[in-house]
Image (tube, helix red, strand yellow):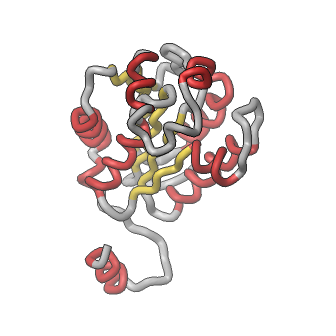
Amino acid sequence: MVGSETSRLVVLRGNSGSGKSSIAAEIRARFGRGVAVVSQDLLRRGVLQEHDVSNGANIGLIDLVARYALDQGFHVVVEGILGATRYEAMLTALLRDHRGVSRCYYLDVPFEETLARHATKPNSREFGADEMRLWYRRLDLLTTGAEQVIPATSSLQASVEQILSDTHLMLHPVALRSNHSTAQRSEMGRNS
C-alpha cells in the first residue's frame, strides 16, 4: 500500500498536445506546495533519454517516483501519453495500491487540435506533425474502465475544476515528511 487516506492521486493520459501538462501545472498552481507532478516526458526523455518501448525503464521509474512522493505526504499527478499497451499494468497497480482517492482521466482531443496546441508550445520544434501522427491513438483507454474522458470542448479551467471537485483535493492539505519543524514548514510555505 502507498500514500495515506488523505493523499490524492491523479493520472492524466492523452495524446501529445492534448493538454496534460497544462492541467497538471494548473492543479499545482491552484493547490500550491505539496503537489508532485510526475511527468512521463521528464523521466523518459529528460532523465533516461529513452525511447517509448515495451518494458522501458521509465515505466518503473514513473511508478517509483509516484509511490515515493505519495509516501512522503505529497499529492501526486502522473501525466503523460502513457499508452495503454505499455503502461496499463503499472498504472493499474499504482491505482490499486494507493490508500487515498485516485482518479484517472483521458483527454480526448482530435488530432488536428493536438497539432494546433503543439504549435504553441516551447518544444514545438523538437518534433512535428509526422511524429505526432505516428504516436496518435484515438481513445486509447485503459481496459479497467477506470478513466473518465475529458472532451476537447472542456477548457483548461473547466478541466481543472472538474478534477479538483472529483478529488476534493483543495480540502486536503499535505503533511509532508521532512526534517523541518512545523514552524519551519510554515515559513517555507510563506516564502514560496
Relative to 38, say whether 181 is above or below.
below
Relative to 105, say whether 42 is above or below.
below
In this orientation, which residue lies closer to the viewer: 102 or 14? 14
Residue 96 relative to residue 52: left or right: left
Instruction: Tell me the quarter of the picture where residue 153 sits.
Output: top left
Pinpoint residue 173: horizontal percent, then vertical percent: 30, 61
Check the image and name the residue furthest to the front. 125
Who's the residue at 26% across and 77% down the image? 190
Who's the residue at 27% across and 35% down the image? 156
Residue 45 relative to residue 80: left or right: right
Residue 45 relative to residue 136: left or right: right
In this orientation, which residue lies closer to the viewer: 184 or 192? 192
Relative to 113, say whether 94 is above or below.
below
Who's the residue at 22% across and 33% down the image? 158
Relative to 87, say whether 130 is above or below.
above
Pinpoint residue 70: horizontal percent, then vertical percent: 50, 56
For the C terminus, the image quarter is bottom left
Who's the residue at 48% across and 15% down the image? 139
Pinpoint residue 27: horizontal percent, then vertical percent: 32, 48
In this orientation, which residue lies closer to the viewer: 184 or 41? 41
Instruction: Tell me the quarter of the picture where residue 132 sits.
Output: top right
